[in-house]
Image (spheres, rainbow, N blue to C red):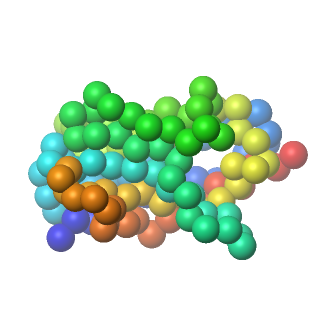
Amino acid sequence: QVQLVESGGGLVQAGGSLRLSCAVSGRTFSSLAMGWFRQAPGTERESVATIDRSGGRTYYADSVKGRFSISTDNAKNTVYLQMNSLKPEDTAVYYCAAKIYYSLKYNYWGQGTQVTVSS
């Protein structure tokens, strides 16, 4: 069973930065594709950034391109989301997710970490 534990959320002023971390256990890290998703109150969960198991292919939502960066550290079985130039509209609960690399859906989820950006 894959377990995901997020950390790094918090309160930051607009224009500031945060780095989210997600520690992965329970399966060989290199067999997983990883992603960060977010959900603001009253909205549906949306994909923010994803990375394939080799780390060579990434995807970013248009709303975060140029500001957010997803990366992995295979030695630490950890995926990161570096968030720069944060905006109040980035306020949400951020979730780390994983899927077996050949799966169509993300089926392992972390508990979520709150990110609040004040104006």
Dividing the picture into quarters, in which one does residue 92 lie? Answer: bottom right
Q: Is residue 81 left or right of residue 33?
A: right
The image shows residue 107, relative to residue 21, as above or below, that is below
Residue drawn at x 71%, y 39% is 86
Where is residue 62? Give x, y as percent.
61, 38
Viewer-nearest residue: 56 or 14: 56
User: Outermost residue toward the front?
Assistant: 104
Q: How many marks?
A: 0
Residue drawn at x 60%, y 26% is 66
Viewer-nearest residue: 81 or 57: 57
Viewer-nearest residue: 74 or 66: 66
Where is residue 88? Give x, y as percent.
79, 48
Q: Is residue 117 left or right of residue 31?
A: right
The image shows residue 56, relative to residue 49, as above or below, that is above
- Could you tell me if residue 108 is visible in this image? yes
Where is residue 64? Give x, y as percent.
62, 38
Q: Is residue 5 left or right of residue 25?
A: right
Dividing the picture into quarters, in which one does residue 79 lie? Answer: top left
Q: Quadrant of the N terminus?
A: bottom left
User: Outermost residue toward the right?
Assistant: 119
Residue drawn at x 22%, y 58% is 103
Where is residue 110? Give x, y as percent.
40, 65
- Could you tell me if residue 8 is visible in this image? no
Residue drawn at x 48%, y 60% is 95
Q: Is residue 7 left or right of residue 23?
A: right
